[in-house]
């Protein structure tokens, strides 16, 4: 066993344990704050896997956008609304729901994993142009250069459309959460009662 | 001598993560935690994209993750806006209580 392979194993399995432990924590923690912090663990594990897969830019974006922005947004909403009290998980209004959900979850994992393992030899190796890996024939920023060329070359129209999506999301959220004053009633129809 | 880590392992790991997220979405009733479970499922899909980008040697997989990130951010913003306006009207509500519009 070479040292590099052993190190890859250590990274893969420790990141996998972080991811799955965090995911289970999201499902079983009673308090939403604990669930959000557990989500950070999962997102960080995914970022480590991205680094292991040589997707360095996406790993950075994963930490900044997901762990930095989205989880903070979750925590902000929890604190803002004061909904951080623990929930009693032993109350279950529909008794059959949890067994059925467990059957569905295990069945989904089993089906997808079986399909993936069966198809492992069917995947064609390297029909694409290949990924630029830092340090070989390109510089340290090979991944981000290749990603930028692809994003702003082949997918520039979709990239512009995401700006429309973000604007619509921001305007919609402002409209949804605004508290309407009495003065606005004359000119604007109220959405909430 | 042990084999090197294959992209198949990442795909299996992503399927487990997706399954946990789907299970959580079905059993939890707090809308915020349901949203976190959706994030888990999106991350499983992202891991699949990146693993197959390595397997197939195609940078388009990583670009797809980029777009998934943008759509996930927009989705969280709109979803949390809806949750805020619901919880402000009736604090402590769960997903089961949101049947007001039922005819």
Image: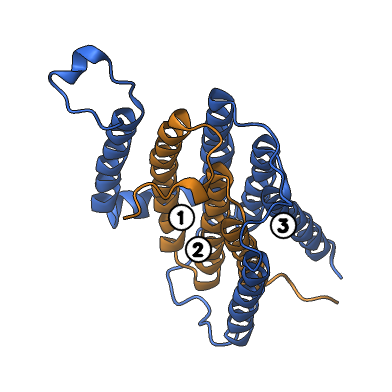
Chain colours: A blue, B orange
Q: Quadrant where the N terminus of chain B lies?
A: bottom right
Q: Is the residue under label 1 in contact with that under label 2 (CB below 8 Å)? A: yes
Q: Quadrant of residue B40?
A: bottom right
Mark 2 or mark 1: name the one nearer the start of the chain. Answer: 2
Q: Which mark is residue B6?
A: none
Q: Relative to A79, does residue A25 appear above or below in the rendering?
A: below
Are the residues flagged by discs 3 and 2 from a single subunit? no
**Which image quadrant for residue B77?**
top left
Q: Position of residue A146 (x, y in %)?
A: 43, 53
Which residue is tagged 3? A20
What separation in Å lies between label 1 and label 3 (alpha carbons)?
A: 20 Å
Rendered position, A9 above or below B95: below
Numbered disc 3: what chain?
A: A
Kindly identify the residue that appears in the image at 45 percent across and 28 percent down.
B88
Q: Chain of mark 2?
A: B
Indicate the secondary structure of the residue bearing disc 2: helix
Cα separation between marks 2 and 1: 7 Å
Q: Quadrant of the C terminus of chain B?
A: bottom left
- Residue A185 visible somewhere in the drawing: yes
> Is the same chain shared between marks 1 and 3?
no
Q: Which numbered marker is on residue B65?
A: 1
**Of the pair A71 and A148, the residue shown nearer to us:** A71
Residue A44, image x and y in percent?
66, 45
Disc sitting over residue B49 in the figure: 2
**Which residue is at a point 29% across and 43% down the rendered structure image?**
A165
SS label for mark 3: helix
Extreme-top residue of the structure: A183
């Amino acid at each position: 066993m070479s040292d590099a392979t052993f190190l890859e194993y250590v990274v893969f399995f420790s990141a996998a344990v972080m991811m799955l432990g965090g995911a289970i924590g999201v499902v079983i923690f009673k308090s939403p704050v604990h669930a959000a912090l557990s989500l950070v663990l999962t997102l960080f594990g995914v970022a480590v896997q991205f680094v292991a897969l040589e997707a360095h830019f996406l790993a950075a974006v994963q930490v900044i956008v997901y762990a930095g922005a989205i989880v903070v947004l979750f925590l902000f909403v929890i604190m803002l609304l004061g909904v951080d009290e623990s929930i009693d998980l032993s109350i279950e209004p529909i008794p059959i729901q949890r067994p059925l959900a467990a059957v569905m979850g295990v069945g989904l994992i089993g089906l997808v994993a079986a399909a993936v393992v069966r198809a492992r030899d069917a995947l064609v190796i390297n029909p694409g142009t290949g990924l630029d890996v830092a340090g070989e024939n390109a510089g340290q920023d090979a991944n981000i250069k290749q990603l930028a060329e692809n994003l702003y070359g082949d997918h520039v129209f979709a990239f512009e459309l995401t700006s429309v999506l973000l604007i619509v999301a921001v305007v919609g959220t402002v409209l949804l959460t605004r508290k309407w004053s009495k003065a606005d009633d004359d000119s604007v129809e109220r959405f909430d009662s | 001598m042990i084999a090197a880590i294959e992209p198949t392992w990442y795909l299996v790991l992503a399927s487990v993560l997706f399954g946990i997220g789907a299970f959580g979405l079905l059993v939890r009733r707090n809308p915020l935690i349901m949203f976190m479970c959706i994030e888990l499922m999106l991350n499983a899909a992202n891991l699949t994209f990146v693993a197959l980008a390595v397997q197939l040697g195609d940078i388009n997989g990583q670009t797809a993750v980029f777009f998934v990130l943008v759509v996930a951010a927009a989705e969280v913003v709109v979803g949390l806006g809806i949750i805020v306006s619901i919880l402000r009207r009736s604090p402590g509500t769960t997903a089961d209580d949101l049947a007001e519009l039922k005819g």
